[in-house]
Image (cartoon, rainbow, N blue to C red):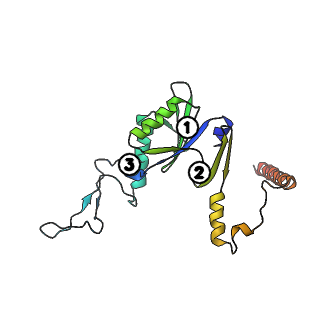
């Protein structure tokens, strides 16, 4: 997000609906499951009938692995993105119009940035058309954090919803009854923090 704001990139998020069910099993990956109550039957011999899964199910031990493999195959092998060697969740592509598109995928949550390119829109449309049903959203929430897109060059990230949830659950009084404090803190406290960080960096250099 900091990179997007610094470079004035368009920022959007999306969720892959029922992501694990979009995973594609290989021919040698065979999984049988007992049907849920209400769908269990036996054959003429009284032997219980089981189902062979066509796609991974939530709760299956390797469902996440299969989904990730399917995702990487789509982005890298079919759409021509490059997967980062340093962060396997990060993918990027240089588009035909000379702009760059970046995608961060955490399980089924995507964060995408681009230079307002129609080709970037086409890449997302191709991803969706391949069966990975996605809903493009404005940048308001990502991985549990509240995000506010003020402009292409300014994004704020906060844990408002998470903190409110914890406070509501554990504090003895309603949250509205507690005084509000403005952050960032006073300049004196910020200066003290900066001095402490600088001192820590000096000590680290001396250790080397």
Which numbered disc flags the more N-terminal residue, 2 or 3? 3
Quadrant occupied by the N terminus = top right
Quarter holding residue 63:
bottom left
For label 2, the crowd category at 10 Å Cα-Cα, with few meaning under 14, some 14 to 19 and many 20 or more, is some
Label 2, on which residue? 141
Label 3, on which residue? 22
- Indicate which disc residue 56 carries: none
Quarter holding residue 8:
top right
Q: Position of residue 203 (x, y in %)?
A: 80, 52
Give the left or right position of residue 14, taking residue 201 as reference.
left
Residue drawn at x 38%, y 39% is 130
Which numbered disc flags the more N-terminal residue, 2 or 1? 1
Q: CA distance from mark 1 to mark 3?
A: 22 Å
Give the structural element (helix, strand or loop) at label 2.
Answer: strand
Give the structural element (helix, strand or loop) at label 1.
Answer: strand
Relative to residue 174, is residue 61 depicted above or below?
Answer: above
Q: CA distance from mark 2 to mark 1?
A: 18 Å
Labels 2 and 1 touching (C-beta < 8 A): no
Q: Nearer the viewer, mark 2 or mark 3?
A: 2
Q: Nearer the viewer, mark 2 or mark 1?
A: 2
Residue drawn at x 41%, y 36% is 77
Residue drawn at x 29%, y 69% is 37
- Indicate which disc residue 102 carries: 1
Residue drawn at x 42%, y 50% is 19
Q: CA distance from mark 2 to mark 3?
A: 23 Å
Relative to residue 53, is residue 91 depicted above or below?
Answer: above
């Amino acid at each position: 997000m900091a990179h997007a704001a610094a470079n004035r990139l368009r920022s959007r998020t999306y969720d892959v609906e029922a992501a694990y069910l979009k995973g594609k099993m290989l021919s040698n990956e065979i999984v049988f499951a007992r049907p849920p109550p209400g769908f269990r039957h036996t054959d003429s011999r009284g032997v219980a009938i089981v189902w062979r899964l066509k796609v991974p199910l939530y709760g299956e031990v390797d469902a996440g692995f299969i989904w990730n493999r399917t995702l990487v195959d789509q982005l890298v092998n079919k759409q021509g993105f490059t997967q980062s060697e340093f962060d396997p969740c990060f993918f990027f592509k240089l588009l035909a119009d000379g702009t760059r598109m970046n995608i961060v995928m955490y399980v089924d949550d995507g964060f995408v940035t681009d230079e307002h390119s129609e080709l970037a829109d086409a890449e997302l449309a191709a991803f969706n058309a391949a069966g990975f049903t996605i809903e493009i959203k404005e940048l308001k929430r990502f991985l549990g954090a509240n995000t506010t897109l003020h402009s292409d060059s300014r994004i704020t990230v906060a844990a408002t919803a998470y903190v409110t949830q914890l406070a509501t659950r554990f504090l003895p009084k309603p949250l509205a009854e507690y005084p509000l404090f403005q952050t960032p803190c006073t300049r004196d406290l910020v200066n003290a923090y900066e001095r402490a960080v600088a001192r820590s960096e000096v000590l680290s250099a001396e250790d080397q």
